[in-house]
Image (cartoon, helix red, strand yellow):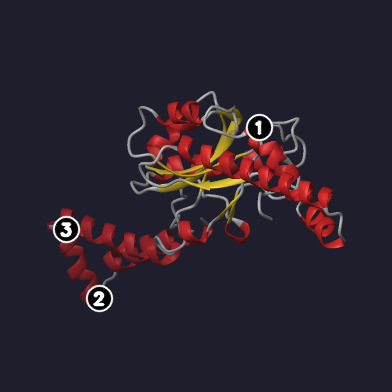
């Protein structure tokens, strides 16, 4: 402001000196002021504006960059969509909610991949009911295990388009029953011929048979065993799905990570506190 005031004073002083001058320039300007006061005032205003711009720097020092109102999506460390072992569950849930909020604010019209963790263990029919009424939602994968207190491994089931998930669950159960039946045959052979080789076979397959026995009795189309799923859908449909009372959390992948690069990890319904390491069938 002191610099601005000085500039204006200099303009005024220069104007007075010019109009009061007894020389030729002063006489000309004096006559102009008397004959065309409007033009004279306009010239003074333009001159003042020029000095103001020079003194203050114009818009150069007052430009304000608009701030973005769209929430940014939290990144995916190592392209992992889901919780990581040792992570606090509350922290993961907050991060997933932030990604959902960013997806909602982003206004994307494309398909988004998301992992949907359920609040309990559902049958295939109950899971299908979650998707009823939603347009364009594609079920890509389901995570199933025998519900606690059974010590069941997690089965990752890739869902074939237009195929009922119940068929896949029945196949998992049938395979488990086959493993149990084959193990019992090996036990019978070892009992009849207790050679070292036969005993070694029984010992090698004991762990697999133990898990298969759990799956044979607790996984199938009619069993409550599905606790998470992976879907693709438009953002507005994912928003609707996230409000279901059976959905614990819906975690959408950022658009910057392609579906093929995602490593998707589910969150089990009974997990609170800290995320434990997960045991997957076949590991």
Q: Nearer the viewer, mark 2 or mark 1?
A: 1
State which quadrant residue 117 falls in: top right
Label 1 neighbour load within 10 Å: few <14, some 14-19, many 20+: few
Which numbered circle lies on residue 23?
2
Residue at the front extreme, as displayed: 192
Judge whether residue 243 can be spotted in this image: no
Query: Where 57 sits versus 65, above or below?
Result: below
Q: Nearer the viewer, mark 3 or mark 2?
A: 3
Which numbered circle lies on residue 39?
3
Which numbered circle lies on residue 189?
none
Question: As drawn, is 230 to the left or to the right of 173?
Answer: left
Residue at the bottom extreme, as displayed: 24
State which quadrant residue 237 falls in: top left
Q: Secondary structure at mark 3?
A: helix
Query: Where 267 sits versus 221, above or below?
Result: below
Question: As drawn, is 215 to the left or to the right of 25?
Answer: right
Question: As drawn, is 199 to the left or to the right of 61?
Answer: right
Can you identify the residue that label 1 sits on? Answer: 217
Question: As drawn, is 161 to the left or to the right of 202?
Answer: left
Q: Secondary structure at mark 1?
A: helix
Judge whether residue 212 can be spotted in this image: yes
Q: Nearer the viewer, residue 165 or 68?
A: 165
Q: Secondary structure at mark 2?
A: loop
Tell me the CA gap for discs 3 and 1. 99 Å
Tell me the CA gap for discs 2 and 1. 115 Å
Q: Earlier in the sequence, mark 3 or mark 1?
A: 3
Tell me the CA gap for discs 3 and 2. 22 Å
């Amino acid at each position: 402001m002191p610099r601005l005031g000085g500039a204006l004073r200099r303009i005024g002083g220069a104007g007075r000196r010019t109009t009061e001058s007894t020389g030729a320039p002063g006489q000309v300007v004096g006559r102009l002021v008397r004959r065309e006061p409007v033009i004279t005032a306009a010239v003074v205003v333009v001159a003042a504006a020029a000095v103001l711009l020079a003194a203050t720097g114009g818009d150069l020092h007052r430009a304000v960059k608009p701030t973005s109102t769209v929430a940014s999506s939290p990144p995916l460390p190592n392209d992992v969509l889901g919780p990581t072992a040792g992570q606090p569950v509350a922290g993961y849930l907050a991060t997933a909610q932030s990604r959902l909020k960013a997806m909602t604010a982003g206004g994307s019209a494309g398909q988004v991949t998301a992992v949907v963790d359920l609040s309990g263990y559902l049958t295939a029919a109950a899971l299908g009911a979650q998707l009823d009424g939603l347009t364009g939602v594609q079920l890509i994968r389901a995570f199933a295990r025998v519900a606690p207190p059974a010590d069941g491994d997690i089965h990752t089931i890739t869902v074939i388009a237009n195929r009922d998930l119940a068929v896949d669950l029945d196949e998992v159960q049938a395979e488990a029953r086959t493993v149990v039946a084959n193990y019992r045959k090996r036990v019978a052979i070892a009992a009849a011929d207790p050679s070292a080789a036969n005993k070694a076979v029984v010992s090698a397959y004991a762990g697999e048979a133990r898990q298969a026995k759990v799956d044979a009795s607790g996984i199938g189309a009619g069993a409550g065993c599905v606790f998470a799923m992976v879907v693709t859908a438009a953002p507005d449909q994912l928003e609707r799905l996230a409000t279901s009372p059976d959905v614990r959390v819906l975690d959408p992948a950022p658009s910057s990570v392609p579906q093929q690069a995602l490593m998707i990890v589910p969150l089990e319904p009974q997990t609170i506190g800290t995320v434990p390491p997960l045991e997957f069938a076949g590991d």
